[in-house]
Amino acid sequence: MSWLRDVVRPKLRELVKGRKEVPDNLWHKCPNCGQMIFHRDLAKNLQVCQHCGHHMRLGAEARLSMLFDNGNFESVELKQPITDPLKFRDLKRYTDRLKDAQAKSKHKDAIIVAHGKLGGVQTVMAAFDFSFMGGSMGIAVGEGILTAARLAVVQRAPLIVLPSSGGARMQEGIHSLMQMARTTIAVEEVRDAGLPYIVVLCDPTTGGVTASFAMLGDIAIAEPGAVIGFAGQRVIEQTIRETLPEGFQRAEYLLEHGMVDMVVARKDLRATLSKIVGILMYPGRAGEVVALIGNDNGPEIEILPPHPGKDAGGKDPDRRGEDPRN
Ligand SMILES: [Zn+2]
């Protein structure tokens, strides 16, 4: 049996050794094109594949620091709701699942609410963390949206929500479904106050989240390739017994069918959002913008967001909008 020892074993060893040479944390495989990407390139590219442009999921904190001016923001401490109201247990206790997720993410739940400046304008943002139990919406997440909406009203600031969620948190049963109504009322409060509410639909935005606040934005932006829908594709196919079209429930498909207003690449998201916020918070300037577009100067006009130093105190006679910093 020497051939086993002399030939087969070394060959097997070589095979296994070859695989071990790539450490998991240095190289990432793009789930779309399969190319290997060095972790530094991936971080520099905001977790977007440089080969095919595939947008990978981003944590809530990374999102917020990518969007706020100079990455500066203040997160808001959220009220601690009742945990595990149903004493739910499947394979594991819900409280244990929560503890695991909290230990991994160092956050209390799947949402972070923060405020700071965006293009010089005071803005409130709420970002979801998909890695925290699939970004599912339970009482704590509902509380987060409510807090963010009320903070926006108090600060006279626009609200930007960035959902990335599998939907309602089934471990909280009916309580999680009630968050759909609760978050809808929350964003209505922002609208009643005459403030902009913008959503940036990140991959994936599904289930109860889509069926509530996520589809109610004054402006709906989506990240390229993001899955956005209520029921999953497979469920729909099984129900209606038809093959769904190519790219169904993807951001681009929704744009074509008028469900979202624009699909914006991650690298352009900050600039786009600060432009929109600038225009909406200072309607006096919107006139200038529309006139410029009407003059056929193309859509790529540099709209300068209001600068706190210059415009403070309402001295600008052209500015009919309210100063969000008051
Ligand atoms: Zn790729």
Image: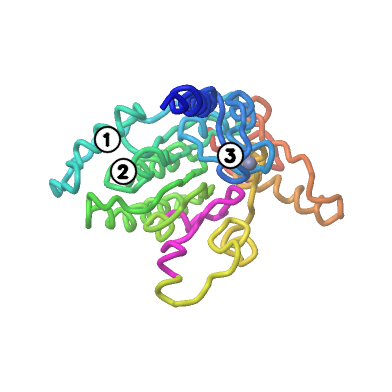
Pick the front one: 284 or 298 = 298
| Apparent side of residue 276 relative to residue 169 in the rendered image (left or right) | right
Q: Position of residue 175 (x, y in %)?
A: 23, 53
Q: Position of residue 284 (x, y in %)?
A: 68, 46
* Dot placed on the residue nearer the N-terminal end, 3 or 1: 3
Disc 2 and disc 1 in contact, CB within 8 angstroms: yes
Distance from disc 2 to disc 1, alpha carbons, whole Å, reads 7 Å
Q: Mark 2 highlights which residue?
A: 143
Q: Mark 1 highlights which residue?
A: 79
| Apparent side of residue 2 relative to residue 40 in the rendered image (left or right) | left
* Dot placed on the residue nearer the N-terminal end, 2 or 1: 1
Q: Mark 3 highlights which residue?
A: 30
Is-magenta flag for residue 214? yes
User: Mark 3 CB in 8 Å range of ligand 1?
Assistant: yes
Decide: is 244 above or below 290: below
Q: Which residues are magenta?
A: 213-236
Distance from disc 3 to disc 1, alpha carbons, whole Å, reads 38 Å
The answer to which quarter of the image holds residue 240 is bottom left
Q: Which amino acid does the dot numbered 1 rest on?
A: Lys
